[in-house]
Image (cartoon, rainbow, N blue to C red):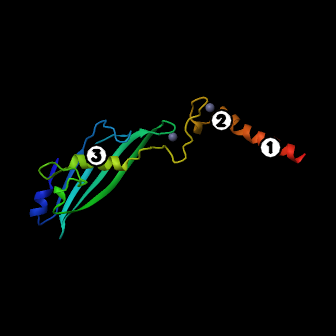
């Protein structure tokens, strides 16, 4: 799906808006993938210097917790806006995905913004304790090796204290 940015910058007098969905199948986005097509709204508005573009993205994704490997479902609902000037489409460093004819690739824009939005390190909860290095089970579900590990150093320190005190 293409939006002719150059033509819009030169000729548009009124705002433009289009609704579309982007089906990414199982495409990898920082280790997550979408569970349904992303629902998007793209708008463009002429301004004095050029145009104001915006894209609103709603998506459901799933991935693996980086610590305990549990399945993590997350939803995203965000808007990005870009203020562009007349000469921007000719700038090789222009941040938006454009083709050689000055058209913006809306699908590529959505992919780019999703990759920016979806965390690189996904966690099931901010304080996920991860997996036990001894038995390989989720620490959050409790395992006995964890308890033994935690008490030993404390006991050692206490016994030194006891020695010092006596
Ligand atoms: Zn986790
Ligand atoms: Zn364990």
Q: Secondary structure at mark 1?
A: helix
Q: Residue furthest right?
A: 166
Q: Can you identify the residue that label 2 sits on? A: 146
Ranked by sequence position, the earlier of labels 2 and 3 is 3
* N-term mark: 1 or 3: 3
Q: Position of residue 34 (x, y in %)?
A: 33, 41
Name the quadrant containing residue 13: bottom left
Q: Nearer the viewer, mark 1 or mark 3?
A: 1
Sequence-earlier tag: 1 or 2: 2
Dot 3: what SS?
helix
Marking on residue 46: none
For disc 3, the marked residue is: 111
Instruction: Give the image location of residue 85, x and y in percent.
Output: 19, 64
Residue 38 screen position, x and y as percent? 28, 46
Give the quadrant of the C terminus: top right
- Please report the residue visible at 61 percent of the width from the left and 30 percent of the height from the top: 134
Q: Are marks 1 and 3 in contact (CB under 8 Å)?
A: no
Tell me how far mark 2 sits from mark 3, CA to CA: 41 Å
Q: Does the beta carbon at disc 1 come under 8 Å from ligand 2?
A: no
Taking the spot 77% from the left edge, 43% from the top edge, the residue there is 157
Mark whose residue sits in front, 1 or 2: 1
Q: Report how far apart the C-alphas of labels 1 and 2 lie in the structure.
A: 19 Å
Disc number placed over residue 158 in the picture, else none: 1
Q: Residue furthest left?
A: 11
Residue 18 at x, y = what percent? 18, 54
Dot 2 and dot 3 residues touching (CB under 8 Å): no
- Most extreme residue toward the front is 92
Does 141 appear above or below 53? Answer: above
Does label 2 point to a residue whose CB lies under 8 Å from ligand 2?
yes
- Taking the image as drawn, is residue 47 in sight? no
């Amino acid at each position: 799906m293409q939006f002719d940015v150059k033509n819009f910058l030169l000729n548009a007098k009124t705002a433009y808006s289009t609704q579309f969905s982007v089906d990414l199948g199982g495409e990898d986005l920082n280790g997550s993938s979408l569970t349904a097509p992303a629902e998007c709204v793209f708008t463009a508005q002429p301004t004095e210097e050029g145009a104001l573009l915006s894209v609103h993205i709603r998506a459901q994704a799933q991935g693996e917790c980086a610590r305990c490997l549990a399945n993590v479902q997350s939803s995203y609902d965000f808007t990005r806006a870009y203020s562009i000037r007349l000469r921007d489409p000719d700038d090789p460093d222009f941040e938006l995905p454009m083709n050689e004819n000055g058209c913006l690739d809306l699908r590529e824009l959505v992919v780019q913004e999703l990759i920016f939005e979806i965390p690189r390190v996904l966690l099931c909860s901010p304080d996920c304790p991860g997996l036990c290095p001894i038995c390989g089970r989720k620490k959050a579900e409790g395992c006995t090796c964890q308890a033994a590990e935690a008490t030993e150093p404390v006991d050692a320190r206490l016994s030194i204290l006891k020695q010092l005190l006596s």
